[in-house]
Image: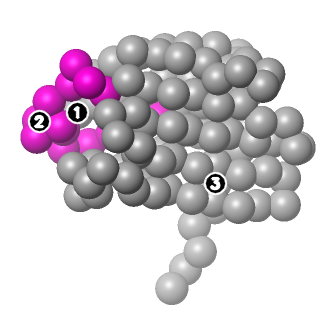
C-alpha cells in the first residue's frame, strides 16, 4: 500500500463519509514529523486539530443544523500563509475561519 503525502502548510482533504452517522468517529488522522492533522466527529460537532511545528490550532464545527443524511462528501482546506480554514459539504462552502494558533478553538457554524 502506497503511503499518501500530506502538506500541513496548505492543502485540501476530501473525505467520503461513512462514519459521520456514528456518535463518535475519527474521520482522518495524520501524524508527521512536522505536525499532525486530525478530523474527528463527536456528537453533533466536527473537531479538527491542525498542528505544525508543535503549535496547534483547533477548529470546531457545529453540525446540528446540517442534515447528516444529505452529506456525501466533506472537504477541508487550510493554508497557514493566509491563515484560512474552509469547510465544504457536497462541494459547497459551509464556513470559513481564520486559523488561530492559540489555546482556545476557532468556532465555525
Specify start and end residues of the magenta stretch as a single range.
Answer: 63-76
Give yes or no for contact between labels 2 and 1 (Cβ–Cβ under 8 Å).
yes
Point out residue 5 in the picture as x, y percentages from the top left corner: 63, 61
- Camera-near label (3 vs 2) is 2
Residue 91 in the figure: left or right of residue 60? left
Label 2 to label 1: alpha-carbon separation = 9 Å
Residue 3 in the figure: left or right of residue 28? right
Asked if one can make out residue 6 in the rendered structure from this viewpoint, the answer is yes
Q: In the rendered image, which residue does mark 2 sit on?
A: 70
Q: Considering the numbered disc 2 on the image, is that residue within a helix, a strand or a loop?
A: helix
Image quarter for residue 91?
top left
First in sequence: mark 3 vs mark 2: 3
Image quarter for residue 105?
top right
Point out residue 46 in the picture as x, y percentages from the top left corner: 43, 36
Give yes or no for contact between labels 3 and 2 (Cβ–Cβ under 8 Å).
no
Label 3 to label 2: alpha-carbon separation = 28 Å
Name the image quarter holding the C terminus: top left
Q: In the rendered image, which residue does mark 3 sit on?
A: 6
**Outermost residue toward the left?**
69
First in sequence: mark 2 vs mark 1: 2
- Label 2, residues with CA under 10 Å away: few <14, some 14-19, many ≥20: few
Q: In the rendered image, which residue does mark 1 sit on?
A: 90
User: 1 and 21: which one is in front?
Assistant: 21
- Label 1, residues with CA under 10 Å away: few <14, some 14-19, many ≥20: few
Point out residue 65 in the picture as x, y percentages from the top left corner: 22, 19
Q: Residue at 47%, 16% (x, y): give it.
A: 108
Amino acid at each position: 500500500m502506497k503511503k499518501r503525502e500530506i502538506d500541513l502548510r496548505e492543502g485540501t482533504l476530501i473525505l467520503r463519509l461513512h462514519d459521520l452517522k456514528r456518535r463518535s468517529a475519527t474521520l482522518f488522522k495524520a501524524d508527521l514529523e512536522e505536525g499532525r492533522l486530525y478530523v474527528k466527529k463527536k456528537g453533533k460537532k466536527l473537531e479538527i486539530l491542525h498542528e505544525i511545528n508543535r503549535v496547534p490550532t483547533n477548529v470546531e464545527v457545529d453540525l446540528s443544523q446540517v442534515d447528516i443524511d444529505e452529506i456525501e462528501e466533506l472537504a477541508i482546506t487550510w493554508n497557514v500563509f493566509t491563515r484560512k480554514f474552509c469547510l465544504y459539504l457536497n462541494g459547497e462552502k459551509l464556513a470559513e475561519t481564520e486559523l488561530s494558533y492559540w489555546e482556545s478553538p476557532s468556532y465555525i457554524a
